[in-house]
Image: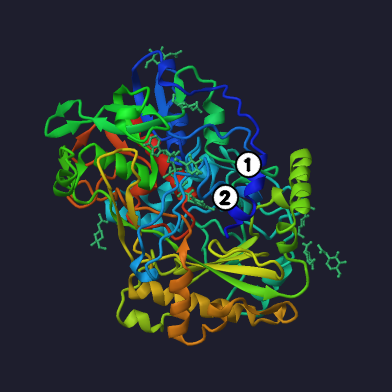
Amino acid sequence: MAPSRLLSFVLTSLFIAPSLSITITQSSQLTTSTFDYVIVGGGTAGLVIANRLTENPHVSVLVLEAGGSDQGIVAAEAPFLGPTLTPNTPFDWNYTVTPQASLNGRSFPYPRGHILGGSSSVNYMVHQVGTNEDWNRLAAVSGDPGWAWNNMRQYISKTEKFVPPIDGHNTTGQFIPSLHGFNGEVLCSLPGGNQTIDSRVIATTQQLAEFPFNQDTMGGDHSLLGVGWMQSTDGGGIRSSSSTSYLAQANSRPNLTVLINATVLKLIQTGTSGSLKAFRSVQFANTGATSVATCSGLRTVTARKEVILSAGSIGSTQILQLSGIGDAKKLASLKIPSTINNPNVGENLSDHPLLPNVFSVKGNLSFDGILRDPNQINNAVGQWISSRTGIFSNNVANHYGFARLPPSSTIFKTTHDPAAGPTSPHWEMVFANFWFNPTVALPATGSFMTIVTVVISPTSRGSITLASSNPFDKPLINPNFLSTDFDIFAMRESVKAIKRFLAAPAWSDYVIGPFGDAFSKAKTDAQIEKYIRGLATTIFHPVGTASMTSAKSSAGVVNPDLTVKGAAGLRVVDASVFPFVPSSHTQGPVYLLAERAADIIKAAA
Ligand SMILES: Cc1cc2nc3c(=O)[nH]c(=O)nc-3n(C[C@H](O)[C@H](O)[C@H](O)COP(=O)(O)OP(=O)(O)OC[C@H]3O[C@@H](n4cnc5c(N)ncnc54)[C@H](O)[C@@H]3O)c2cc1C
Ligand SMILES: *[C@@H]1O[C@H](CO)[C@@H](O)[C@H](O)[C@H]1NC(C)=O
Ligand SMILES: *[C@@H]1O[C@H](CO)[C@@H](O)[C@H](O)[C@H]1NC(C)=O
Ligand SMILES: *[C@@H]1O[C@H](CO)[C@@H](O)[C@H](O)[C@H]1NC(C)=O
Ligand SMILES: *[C@@H]1O[C@H](CO)[C@@H](O)[C@H](O)[C@H]1NC(C)=O
Ligand SMILES: *[C@@H]1O[C@H](CO)[C@@H](O)[C@H](O)[C@H]1NC(C)=O
Ligand SMILES: *[C@@H]1O[C@H](CO)[C@@H](O)[C@H](O)[C@H]1NC(C)=O
Ligand SMILES: *[C@@H]1O[C@H](CO)[C@@H](O)[C@H](O)[C@H]1NC(C)=O
């Protein structure tokens, strides 16, 4: 059972009626059909663009968002309750992956935020920006030095507003202030609540040379290798999303219109510009229909300057294909007329696979006792509502770390090192003080800790394809998880490594051992692989489906300025344009990408 399902009654019982002060919900409320810019998707990237473009009061912007308001939803505000927002809730697109060939044919949920703020309103708020090598590789692949870290670094100060932790403790040594921004839009903070395993994690970094302490886990100018304190996009015990930050700062601007409950069906070609086809019109309808025939409020709006597609790695891909921008042959089989034949659209999907390794622990200091007791949950919710303190004011983990495979690893005899560079990680570990297994129910008794491991430099590539020409049908999402020798090798070695981590003296009076049959029996390489294939899922970082390549390249989907190849008046600004998944959690990289994209768009105007 997901922690989400475990706590689902919290979510439903705490839905406070939203107050829609700045947004409109029906297409009939629009007073014009023409705007300077139309942004498709009010998510992480889309609301950054909306904010930055409307800094100029003479620029008019419409944001079309399929989801509803994020206001007044306790689970979207209390950091620890983030995992209750997905999957299969009113705030989720409810996608699943196709049966995964390398994961015993399993299918599982593939959440995406269906709400103002997009995935930044439903994610787990881990804050990082990728490594400098991620950005330098992007610059090399795209041929645009503007994507290199020495240029991207400047956007940290526009994005980050670092604030003290909720418990006000002295954070000296837990992060490096000079690397951070203190006047940007999104609140970021260090943990403000003890998870009881904290002192053991830190002690391990002193006891084992393999796992050094990392004083700052954001990335960028500082190495991600080692174990350190988690930074989260929250402040004062409350989630900070693109909606509560970028949009809240901009929502009094008269030339910004945000229409929620508006599902975009497709882009419409509006003419040509030399050899390029212009796509400046957007067709949308009120959310909630199942077919074009039954949808209400069908309407078309037009951008004088540009349409910005920010519907995310799944949504943007689907909209491009529904608009005829994709593989002409595949689209023809669905009777969708081709507008720009580009077989790369939807290909090269890349994501980080996740493995929740659960251990039994002694005593009752884990959170499991609280999380299986409705009374204690209610008390904790009450405490959060009255004072923004307590267990739910903190994120779900306080520590995590990143590591590389040893250079002598046998895999490097057959596989070129896929890391972003020689100092970027291959895998990640996240420490949670409780049962955190998305596929198996919390047992009725027992205390647990979970070390989630993640392959950070995967070589598997998948795809997103349309299931039909109906824009309300979910696309087929195939991340092809753990389908390469490298990926399964890295995940296997991560399992061995965390066992070494827990062999440190710091854990001797705490950890009992791996929980469950499959994990307990996973001793040989073959047994570990079997365990992995039966359990691994996703840490929700899809990218690559509208990859950025150099302007001269016919591979890829967008140019380095994020314009769509072969199109005029159309850019993609969201996670889908990263050709490689960053060596970190992906929200921060999306914020930085969107900040630079806004500068590019302004300069082109
Ligand atoms: C459950 C979960 C947990 C995560 N945890 C973390 C984490 O801890 N740290 C981290 O760094 N990253 C995390 N991520 C990943 C991170 O949130 C994403 O990489 C990032 O937010 C993606 O931003 P985006 O702008 O590309 O897309 P999104 O933020 O998803 O925005 C896309 C928006 O477009 C809208 N949209 C889509 N299709 C349409 C349409 N047809 N019409 C109108 N609107 C549409 C969507 O509703 C959404 O609002 C998590 C993601 C999930 C889902
Ligand atoms: C809104 O933008 C338009 C141009 O797109 C401009 O003509 C108008 O003056 C702006 N309105 C305000 C209130 O600034
Ligand atoms: C996802 O599923 C939930 C629960 O069934 C439902 O309320 C919600 O409307 C669904 N989301 C979408 C986008 O259909
Ligand atoms: C925080 O701790 C550091 C190191 O222990 C110390 O130098 C500093 O003065 C402390 N700051 C405050 C505000 O107490
Ligand atoms: C956290 O809790 C553990 C166990 O209760 C305790 O040993 C440790 O000192 C605490 N750490 C802090 C910083 O309070
Ligand atoms: C979205 O639009 C549909 C169709 O008009 C309507 O039934 C529904 O209540 C709307 N939702 C919101 C949040 O306004
Ligand atoms: C944990 O165990 C101790 C000692 O048995 C007991 O006093 C305490 O109430 C327990 N705490 C919880 C949260 O169950
Ligand atoms: C897509 O992936 C293939 C195989 O991994 C690779 O050769 C190609 O360069 C990638 N294309 C883009 C645009 O990233």
The residue most toward the bottom is 524
Secondary structure of the residue carrying tag 2 is loop
Please state the quadrant of the image where ligand 1 appears. top left
Query: Splitting the image into 4 quarters, where does residue 582 fall?
Result: bottom left
Q: Quadrant of the N terminus?
A: bottom right
Q: Is mark 2 within 8 Å of ligand 1?
A: yes
Question: Against 135, is 455 above or below?
Answer: below
- In the picture, measured across the screen, residue 432 lies left or right of residue 39, that is right
Q: Give percent across and percent down for residue 329.
A: 13, 48
Q: Amino acid at mark 2?
A: Met
Which residue is labeled 1 in the image?
A: 12
Residue at (56% x, 46% y) in the render: 85
Question: Against 349, is 512 above or below?
Answer: below
* Nearer to the camera, 582 or 113: 113
Query: Splitting the image into 4 quarters, where does residue 447 fall?
Result: bottom right
- Graded by Cα atoms within 10 Å as few (under 14), some (14 to 19) or many (20 or more), the crowding at tag 1 reads some
Which residue is labeled 2 in the image?
A: 125
